[in-house]
Image: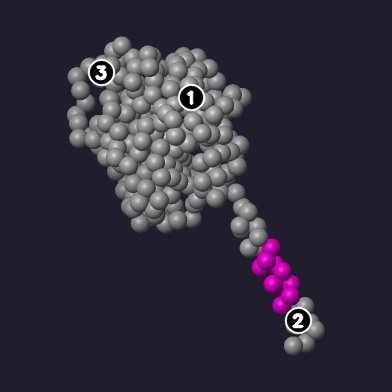
């Protein structure tokens, strides 16, 4: 081998080593489900959704603060496309938003309940949730995501807490996201308790639906004083009814270590 060839091969080997090193230490890519705005156009053009995908910056900033790289997930129409996208990512966050259609857990909307659904988003989010579970991808689910993932795993929901549990502790606050308006009790042995080093916590609350029958394969990590489930965990699953990203965005960092633990799981 000539000297020039040897130098060329050596440089190539060095570049490969640097590339492999950077890959092994890169930040995890976290796909985040967005919401979808209404569209004034005809929605019969063959797309899964004909509106605009939108994601609050609070989710993006929280993933970044926790050590990950956020990737906004596109609308997909089949499980193969969904699996192809998720195969390139290290984990997924299911964001908050509208109510889940009760049809997904075998119910019709009950009389008196205020239930507002987004059928297109339900379709896409459910596809991502079920595919991510099948692929054993780490998942962090928040509020709507917490509820949807429970249903994807076989559980059910309260459609409207004021209607079905009228004496609840109050789950729809008007205060800003860095203010906790009700207490949760955290279960012994849970990752939530281990990471936060607390057995109780005051959290924010912006929901009127909630987990009723918990899915098999996950366990409760937190409840409110009215008995409502506020957190559950499973293998590769972190799920909370409250909004860590709202609190973190306003400078309340108590819940950041839990998101960091999720991102660490994605490495």
Task: From the image, tell me which residue sits under label 1.
Answer: 199
Mark 3 and mark 1 in contact? Answer it, CB < 8 Å: no
Q: Main secondary structure of the magenta part?
A: helix
x 49%, y 21%: residue: 201
Along the line of sight, the residue nearer the viewer: 7 or 182: 182
Q: Quick check: can you spot residue 223?
A: yes
Residue 6: assigned label: 2
Q: Is residue 18 left or right of residue 141?
A: right
Q: Is residue 185 left or right of residue 256?
A: left
Q: Which corner quadrant of the image does residue 159 belong to?
A: top left
- For the record, the magenta segment spans 9-18
Choose mark 2 or mark 1, whichever is in front: 1
Q: Residue at (63%, 54%) from the top-left corner?
A: 25
Q: CA distance from mark 3 to mark 1?
A: 28 Å
| Res 263 label | none
Q: Residue at x 70, y 72 (%)?
A: 12
Q: Position of residue 101 (x, y in %)?
A: 27, 32
Q: Which mark is residue 164?
A: 3
């Amino acid at each position: 081998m000539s000297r020039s060839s040897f130098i060329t091969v050596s440089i190539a080997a060095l570049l490969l080593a640097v590339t492999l090193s950077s890959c092994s230490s890169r930040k995890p890519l976290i796909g985040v489900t967005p919401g979808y705005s209404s569209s004034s156009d005809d929605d019969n053009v063959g797309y899964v959704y004909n509106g605009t995908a939108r994601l609050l910056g609070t989710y993006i900033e929280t993933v970044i603060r926790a050590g990950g790289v956020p990737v906004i997930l596109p609308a997909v129409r089949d499980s193969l496309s969904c699996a192809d996208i998720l195969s390139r990512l290290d984990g997924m966050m299911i964001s908050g938003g509208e109510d889940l259609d009760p049809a997904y857990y075998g119910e019709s909307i009950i009389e008196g309940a205020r239930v507002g659904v987004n059928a297109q988003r339900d379709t896409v989010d459910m596809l991502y949730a079920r595919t991510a579970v099948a692929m054993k991808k780490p998942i962090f689910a928040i509020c709507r995501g917490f509820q949807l993932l429970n249903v994807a795993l076989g559980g059910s929901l309260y459609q409207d807490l004021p209607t079905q549990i009228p004496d609840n502790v109050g789950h729809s606050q008007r205060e800003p996201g860095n203010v906790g308006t009700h207490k949760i009790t955290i279960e012994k042995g849970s990752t939530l308790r281990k990471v936060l080093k607390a057995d109780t916590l005051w959290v924010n609350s912006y929901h009127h639906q909630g987990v009723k029958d918990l899915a098999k394969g996950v366990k409760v990590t937190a409840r409110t004083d009215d008995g409502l489930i506020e957190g559950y965990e499973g293998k590769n699953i972190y799920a909370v009814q409250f909004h860590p990203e709202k609190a973190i965005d306003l400078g309340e960092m108590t819940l950041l270590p839990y998101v960091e633990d999720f991102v660490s799981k994605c490495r």
